[in-house]
Amino acid sequence: MSIIHKLLGAIILLIDWLTTPKSVRRSDHQQTAINEQAKALTLYQYKACPFCVKVRRSMKRHALPIETRDAKRSETAKHELVNGGGKLKVPCLKIIDSSGDVNWMYESKAIIRYLEERFTQAA
Ligand SMILES: N[C@@H](CCC(=O)N[C@@H](CS)C(=O)NCC(=O)O)C(=O)O
């Protein structure tokens, strides 16, 4: 990775840290239900990818404890993503529905829209 890439990544992470959004507050009962639902979701991502930062900020805003797996640092996560989703591109949200079917959702905008539609009303 070039120095410029590393520097850009560090700047992105710094701005993200300085402007971390507040999380929505729910009743304990509601948050417990959300936490249960979040267990069926996994975000494949890179730490300093700006599209992944956008998705992680949305997760923070909606107080979603979604597991993240770094497809750059972990060969296992990379294989899971490529084998399951079909391509090495992040962010990608793995969604297991109530029937156990698995869907791999690419594109940060689509993922953020999905999280907002699914979890905003529950706030
Ligand atoms: N339009 C996509 C862009 C995603 C994207 O370009 N991700 C880059 C990382 S920042 C990527 O996965 N590149 C492939 C690779 O690193 O192998 C989105 O909004 O999610």
Image: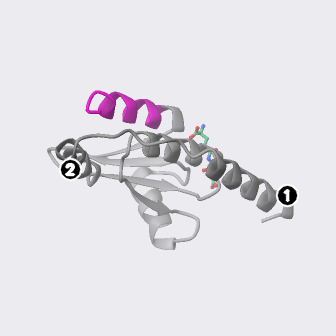
Magenta segment range?
110-123
The amino acid sitting under disc 1 is Ile
In the rendered structure, which disc, 2 or 1, sits on the residue that comes first in sequence?
A: 1
Residue 24 picture quarter:
top left
Left or right: residue 14 versus residue 98 is right
Q: Residue 97 at what x, y percent from top left?
A: 22, 44
Measured as percent of width and height from the top left, residue 91 is found at 52, 48
Residue 15's x, y, as percent?
Answer: 69, 48
Instruction: Look at mark 1 in the image and give the residue it sits on.
Output: 4
- Would the CB of label 2 be found within 8 Å of ligand 1? no
* Quadrant, the N terminus: bottom right
Q: Does the rendering let one see residue 49?
A: no
Secondary structure mostly taken by the magenta-highlighted segment of the chain: helix
Measured along the vertical axis of the image, is residue 15 above or below residue 83? above
- Horizontally, is 73 left or right of 62 in the view? right
Q: Does residue 112 show up magenta in the picture?
A: yes
Looking at the image, residue 48 lies above or below residue 73: above
Observer-nearest residue: 49 or 14?
14
Write the residue at 45% across / 71% down. 76
In the picture of the structure, the residue carrying the numbered disc 2 is 32
